[in-house]
Image (cartoon, helix red, strand yellow):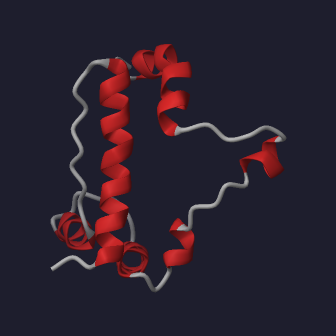
Amino acid sequence: MADDHSIGIRRRSCGFIWCQTKVLGTEIRCDIRGPEDYAAAIAHGSTNVESWYAEAGVDFTRQVIDGRMGYIGTVRDDVEFVAGRPSISLREWAIENRDRLAAGSTT
């Protein structure tokens, strides 16, 4: 069963896809896969990496999802500090970049 932290990560990821779908007017599916899916892909040979590296990737993913490395997903509003301008919402960004997003979806 998923905990609150992993549910939050999945909702944010799907929210990004939902926003792009609404702005572009084209359905974009959100098919989030977890560490077990990644491990299964490795076991079936669908990745061409050394096993120790792949296993580290699976463990890293588990730690981010279960909160042990939750700081990686910490959301802060440092845009103004870094870019010198206030941040905008994801929806505003997607609208501003609609043409670039649409062009990227066909390539």
Tell me the quarter of the image containing the N terminus.
Answer: bottom left
Q: Please tell me which residue lies in front, 44 or 71.
A: 71
- Tell me which residue sits at (21%, 38%) in the image: 29
- Image location of residue 16, percent across then percent down: 39, 42
User: What is the count of numbered marks?
Assistant: 0
* Any part of residue 97 in sight: no
Res 105 → quadrant: top left
* Any part of residue 23 in sight: yes
Instruction: Classify 44 as above or below 17.
Output: below
Q: Please tell me which residue lies in front, 59 or 49.
A: 59
Answer with left or right where residue 74 lies relative to residue 59.
right
- Tell me which residue sits at (45%, 22%) in the image: 101
Res 7 → quadrant: bottom left
Query: Which residue is most to the bottom?
Result: 68
- Image location of residue 14, percent across then percent down: 30, 48
- Image location of residue 57, percent across then percent down: 41, 72
- Tell me which residue sits at (56%, 68%) in the image: 74
Tell me the quarter of the image containing the C terminus.
Answer: top left
Instruction: Classify 74 as above or below 89.
Output: below
- Image location of residue 84, percent across then percent down: 84, 41
Q: Please tell me which residue lies in front, 91 or 83.
A: 91
Instruction: Classify 80 as above or below 100.
Output: below
- Tell me which residue sits at (17%, 69%) in the image: 40
Answer with left or right where residue 10 lies relative to residue 71.
left
Q: Please tell me which residue lies in front, 40 or 31.
A: 31
Answer with left or right where residue 20 lies relative to residue 35.
right
Res 51 → quadrant: bottom left
